[in-house]
Amino acid sequence: MKPILIILPSKGRPEKIEGFYETWRRTTNGLSEVVTFLDEDDPALRKYKKHKDITFDIGSGKSFSDACNRAFKKNPNYKYYFIVSDDHRLKSDNWEKRFTNIIEENGGKGVSFGDDLMYGNKIASAALVSGNIFRSLGFVTLPGLIHMYTDAFWTEIGRKLNKLFYFPDIIIEHLHFTVGKSPVDSIYLSVDNKIVYEHDKKVFNTWKREQMKNDIEKIKAYKGS
């Protein structure tokens, strides 16, 4: 088992995801492995190309958030988790060592991220998170979230722990349609809309108001690996 599990949910994009695989192979130091989490009801499921170095996990999941939590439930013991989307592209070498080393040098708990060329240091849209954080909470993304605010959740945890580490020279480009780097498709439209945004905003803000303080204390107190 490698120290880093890359959680890569995907639906309806068997061609787009190949770009992530290619950039991962070019930049990995051999410290990570990729598991692609697919939906059993995806009409494009059979079009996903199988690779010897990529593992598929096929199950039922209603959302990106559900897929992330399914990933952790099935794989609870990795030292680090790196959560990405199929439209992220790794552009920098040594990201694995640099992301993990900074966390190790600062007590072994934390969140590392690079520049996605959309939000810079504002939000960790592709986050490497130490596994002890997720093990202390029991989940990767807030239960109730659909898609939005998952990255805000990891960012806020890192910030409140004073363990949020940003690398402006590590590029993890986000080829999102809102910046003209991908064509609009039905997958984007199903989650990038006002209904999902308002729902997830409410879930996130409720957590910040009612549960965040307790969760941060729980993470701090957690002594496991």
Image (tube, rainbow, N blue to C red):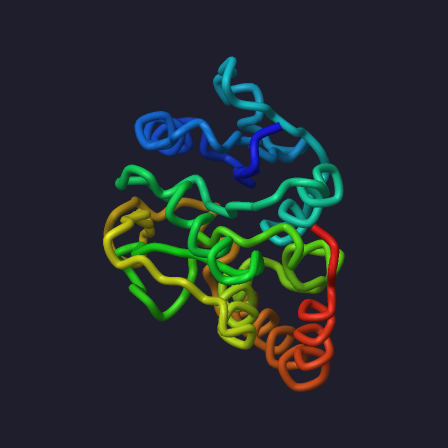
Residue 96 occupies quadrant: top left
Vertical placement of residue 70 versus 34, above or below: below
Where residue 154 appears, as percent x and y from the top left, is: 54, 63
Where residue 216 appears, as percent x and y from the top left, is: 66, 74
Residue 140 occupies quadrant: bottom right
Q: Residue at x 48, y 64 (%)?
A: 193
Q: Nearer the viewer, residue 43 or 40?
A: 40
Q: Residue at x 52, y 72 (%)?
A: 156
Outermost residue to the top:
52
Q: Residue at x 63, y 50 (%)?
A: 131
From the image, which quarter does the N terminus lie in?
top right
Vertical placement of residue 97 versus 137, above or below: above
Q: How many marks?
A: 0
Q: Nearer the viewer, residue 179 or 105?
A: 105
Q: Nearer the viewer, residue 182 or 204?
A: 204
Outermost residue to the bottom:
209
Residue 200 occupies quadrant: bottom right
Residue 103 placement, left or right of 22: right
Where residue 139 appears, as percent x and y from the top left, is: 71, 56
Where residue 69 appears, as percent x and y from the top left, is: 69, 49
Residue 33 placement, left or right of 16: right
Q: Residue at x 38, y 31 (%)?
A: 28
